[in-house]
Amino acid sequence: MRNYRLDNQWDVELGFEEDGTTTLCQARLIGDRAPAVLGRGEAQRSAVDRPAPRIGEELAAARALTALARQLRAQADGEIGEVNRNPAYPDY
């Protein structure tokens, strides 16, 4: 196993807004060299379900992180195309 020195670190910040039935989440990367991408996710509680804020946060966060990952991949694909002067063909 190789020892790599970490000279670049990104953290993920999740922020939530809730109104009792809807939970919104924003996910963004934090770091000096982190790309400027933002993912948003939403979860809605059915009127017949009892309140469980934690479940709404988990669903909204998962959706926001998925959106963040898609944007990050799209940005990387665009940069690959610029560097290679050919479009990138995602393998996902």
Image (cartoon, grey):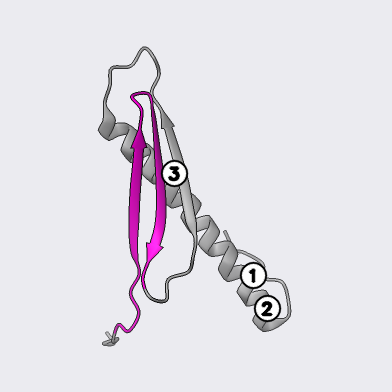
SS under mark 3:
helix
In the image, farthest residue toward the right: 86
> Disc number at residue 63?
3
Q: Which residue is drawn at 71% across and 72% down?
A: 87
Q: In this view, does 20 lie above or below 64?
A: above
Give yes or no for residue 26 being in the magenta stretch.
yes
Distance of label 1 from label 2 (alpha carbons): 6 Å
Viewer-side residue, 78 vs 29: 29
Residue highlighted by disc 2: 82
Q: Where is residue 34 in the image (x, y as percent from the top left)?
A: 42, 71
Viewer-side residue, 66 vs 7: 7
SS under mark 1:
helix
Span colored in magenta: 6-31
Give yes or no for residue 43 being in the magenta stretch.
no
* Label 1, residues with CA under 10 Å away: few <14, some 14-19, many ≥20: some
Q: For this view, does 86 lie left or right of residue 76?
A: right
Q: Is residue 82 above or below residue 73?
A: below
| Helix, strand or loop for the magenta stretch, by majority | strand
> Disc number at residue 78?
1
**Residue type highlighted by circle 2:** Glu
Q: Where is residue 63 in the image (x, y as percent from the top left)?
A: 44, 44
Q: Is residue 19 above or below residue 3?
A: above
On the image, which quarter does residue 11 sit in? bottom left
Mark 1 and mark 2 in contact? Answer it, CB < 8 Å: yes
Q: Which residue is drawn at 34% across and 51% down?
A: 14
